[in-house]
Image: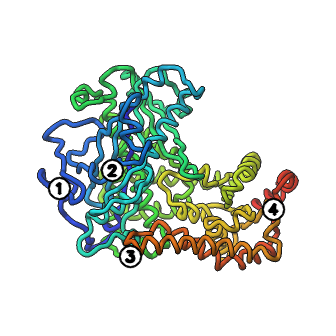
Amino acid sequence: MFLTLQIPLFDYRFFESAPQRTERPKWPEPGPKERIRYFGEVVDRNARYVGPWDDEKKYCNAAGVINFCGTEHHHFYKAFYAKPNNARILFRRFQSDGRCLSKFEIGINDQLETSLSGPAGDGKDISDRITGHIGKYLLCPVKIKIGNRLSGFVPLVEAGNNLKDAYYWTTTVGKKSFDPKDVQHRVEHCEPLLLVQLQSDTIGSAELKAQQVDMPFTKHAGIKLFCRHISYNIGRTRYQLKTWIIVTPEKKETVPVYAPDFHSYSQVLRYLRINLLRIHVETCMEKRLMETFGTTNDAYQVKDAQVRDRLYFYLHKILLNLSNIQRNNQPQDKLVEAAFRLDEYYYGSMRIEDRIKMLGDYQDWLSKLPVSPKNEQVKEYVQQSQVALQEAQKAKAQDYIAFISYNHADEKKVNLLKDKLEGAGITVILDSASMQAGTAIDDFITASIKRANAIVSVVSKNSLTSGWVGVETINAMFIKKYFPEKKFIPCNIDSEFMKDKFTDTARAKLRKRIRAIEKMAAARAAGGKRFVDFDDEWRRLENLDKALPEIIQYLKNDLCIAIGGRSLNANLNKILNAIKA
């Protein structure tokens, strides 16, 4: 198995007329002897053919940035390096186009196919075995070097936030600190992509539980392409990772292990990998740019006309690439279509209305460009996108979307509610089923509430002492105040919150946890150690402690629908009517 994890970064400093970032090395064409401080040397592909994973002529070796150190049995070299996996880290590298786009890519190889050919001792089918095996790599603990300091342990797939900090710290000119808040509104990590290459001609879509993408140009080479989401869990939260799976014939040279093996690598396969990785990073950039043009957030708004024109030209370049009929001698329309279909499951993107408006503004800008085949190609692509969005808008006119806010201790009852709502045709956003890989939980909550027609808040003694559910409830109450079309539907599993002493008891529990956090933070500070990992939880609990009396009053005054015990079946129609009202 050849596994490639791509983590794009979006650099908002390109918006600025005088961005405070280093110009050395100067991307995309750095000098042959340049280095990026704290990262590594720049590799020149013209000097030596070093692999098929993509075609940048120059990139930076980022082995010093991504440290596979791990702990105990989770240590990469203990868990994967030895038999039966014989895993090898093929590359850790960084590349930038000198504008908005930067990216990290990590490549790992092992001998998974050997174990797939034998019987499964655990009784799992091929798809579950592959997913479980990949999940171990995704959750492998790593440390990220930020300046001259190492971060705490993070799962590899969640390393984007730290890699963003490392990139910002390394490329910023002038005084800077290690405080992640300094990076806010300057650099963001985008959703990661997984590219999995398996060596077997016996694996089909049924075994992979994936959708096969029909690509005639790969058939003669015996290559099959699939797309799906691979799930992984961190704590009690389930994430979805966009994944391309390439299944190649059983030939020794198709999945190289050592550097000399790459010389006989299939050109069809090489171009396919290049195109898939490029399409992902371009769709990430397109989405970020469109969100920037359509945002109401002052931190992201583009007010300078010259900067706006520069960003439009950058977007024009991206759309020109995405609208190409062919790239690297391969038709790419089905690849782009499948890439956007994979992205449909992300519940945090722009509203259709905002996207249509933004494309209209961009089309006005396009109309002022000289007439040329390339410009006409982009115009046609934008027009097709507008038509597709307008059709989707009509189709969603009667589509009801509900975001369920809950505490994971109530997960069993919530999953039952989710199944009932989906059975009645309601689209449900649930963090355990809907969160995209690399998404910050607070960003997901805010975007989900904005997208949903209704916020179903599952109330229980567990949820009312949960920091995250408190954030969701406060946000929902705030949004309802200013967006009356949003429906806030409280449903209670138990009636503990109705008791007179509940607020005092719950606040005492919150204060106990807050004091425990403050004590741990003080102990670390006394030892000269950082305690930023406590900040978010402390802030959420403090906010909930202050807002809890208002939340309880709100719930008591509103009609709370009982769903505990057998009440769910009896009251399901009440919930459906409230969502559709």
Q: Nearer the viewer, residue 416 or 346?
A: 416
Q: Which mark is residue 35?
A: 1
**Which residue corresponds to mark 4?**
494
Which badge, 3 or 1, is on the more N-terminal residue?
1
Residue type, mark 3 in image: Lys
Marks 2 and 3 sit apart, C-alpha to C-alpha, by 40 Å
Which badge, 4 or 2, is on the more N-terminal residue?
2
Image coordinates of residue 217 in percent, x first then y, are: 38, 28
Q: Which mark is residue 437?
A: none
Residue type, mark 2 in image: Asn
Q: Quadrant of the C terminus?
A: bottom right
- Marks 3 and 4: in contact by CB < 8 Å? no
**Which residue corresponds to mark 2?**
67
Which badge, 4 or 3, is on the more N-terminal residue?
3
Name the side, left or right, on which 320 lies relative to 135.
Answer: left
Element on which disc 1 rests: strand
4 vs 3, front mark: 4
How many residues crowd around disc 3 within 10 Å: few (fewer than 14), some, or many (20 or more)? few
Name the side, left or right, on which 81 lies relative to 483.
Answer: left
Marks 4 and 3 sit apart, C-alpha to C-alpha, by 50 Å
- Marks 1 and 4: in contact by CB < 8 Å? no
**Which residue corresponds to mark 3?**
303
Marks 2 and 1 sit apart, C-alpha to C-alpha, by 19 Å
Which badge, 2 or 3, is on the more N-terminal residue?
2
Q: Nearer the viewer, residue 297 or 137?
A: 137
